[in-house]
Image: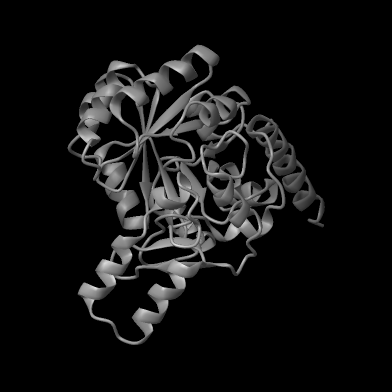
Amino acid sequence: MLATRLTSLLGIRHPIVQGGMSWASSNAELALAVSEAGGLGVIAAGPMYPDDLRAAIARVRAGTRQPFAVNVPLYNKRAAEFLDIVLETEVPVIIASQGGPKAHIGRFKDAGVTWIQVTANPLHARKAEDAGVDAVIAVGGEAGGHPGPDEVGTLVLVRATVNAVTVPVIGAGGIADGAGIAAMLALGASGAQLGTRFLLTPESGLHAAYKDLVLNAGIGDTAIVGRGRSPIRMVKNAFSAEYEAAANRGADDAELDALFARSSLRQAAKDGDVALGKVEAGQSAGLIDKLEPAGELVERLAREAEAALAGAASCIR
């Protein structure tokens, strides 16, 4: 078992965090399986109605005594209600993204909730630490969904963030196996967050067509769409090709904004329209060749990480 500052902080067995992914983990099943297996399972509140979030929290709590988290995107129109629910239901860990913690963190610290902040660069990580967060997640450019606009790779970003803050750092972006987790630990991080790998589990709440497209993607089959707006990394499809063509011919901002708005994550995740919807996934899709139950996955990842670290140590003469 790999004991790190993160496992000590959260009371989990393995330094593995399941990414909070809208629709994929906007349910109880994925978070429950991950937490029960010794990682940190995360419910993604973003697209949920408040009563559904309450029900998912209750379901996870009924199924495991292990810690779990709720991810709240702070820009969301229901963020204030989500934050209230996290406190009311005594969720032990909050993972906040897409907004700063300063205006909210005080009452969570008073309630004993562990606050983890998603960050895109070392400056944001330092500001989050100054605001009082307990840990930060450094998300590199390989990640699916919303990587940082600077598109700095995980290897560089995680190391720079470790050098910038004293709180535990969780590395994210491009990690699909135990070797990737070991790499984060070697960089000085205290754990790793995996999104795309947990997306490809039976417990994730995505349409089968979405999972099939991601499962068949190679390491070069994703693209950043919407640079200069709210960029996302997604699997290439008809929508991404149309957007790229418009950008390359010099379409104006109004046309690009309209085109970007015509496609949504829900369209792909819930309706199965993987040609015109936003199929968010990271480059690590190319390292994954099967669906795997989330609990079994956590245990395999932990074994692989231990073996990778032992193997690296044995290479030292």
Q: Quadrant of residue 297?
A: top right
Q: Which part of the image, by quadrant, shows the C terminus? A: bottom right
* Residue 211 on image: x %, y %: 59, 49
Q: Which part of the image, by quadrant, shows the N terminus? A: top right
- Residue located 73% across and 40% down the image: 306
- Residue located 51% across and 29% down the image: 31
- Residue located 26% across and 41% down the image: 74
Residue closer to the observer: 314 or 81: 81
Residue 215 as seen in the image, left or right of residue 304: left
* Residue 68 on image: x %, y %: 47, 25
* Residue 273 on image: x %, y %: 48, 55
* Residue 164 on image: x %, y %: 39, 53
Residue closer to the observer: 305 or 298: 298
Residue 54 as seen in the image, left or right of residue 160: left
Residue 95 as seen in the image, left or right of residue 59: left
Q: Is residue 306 above or below residue 155?
A: above
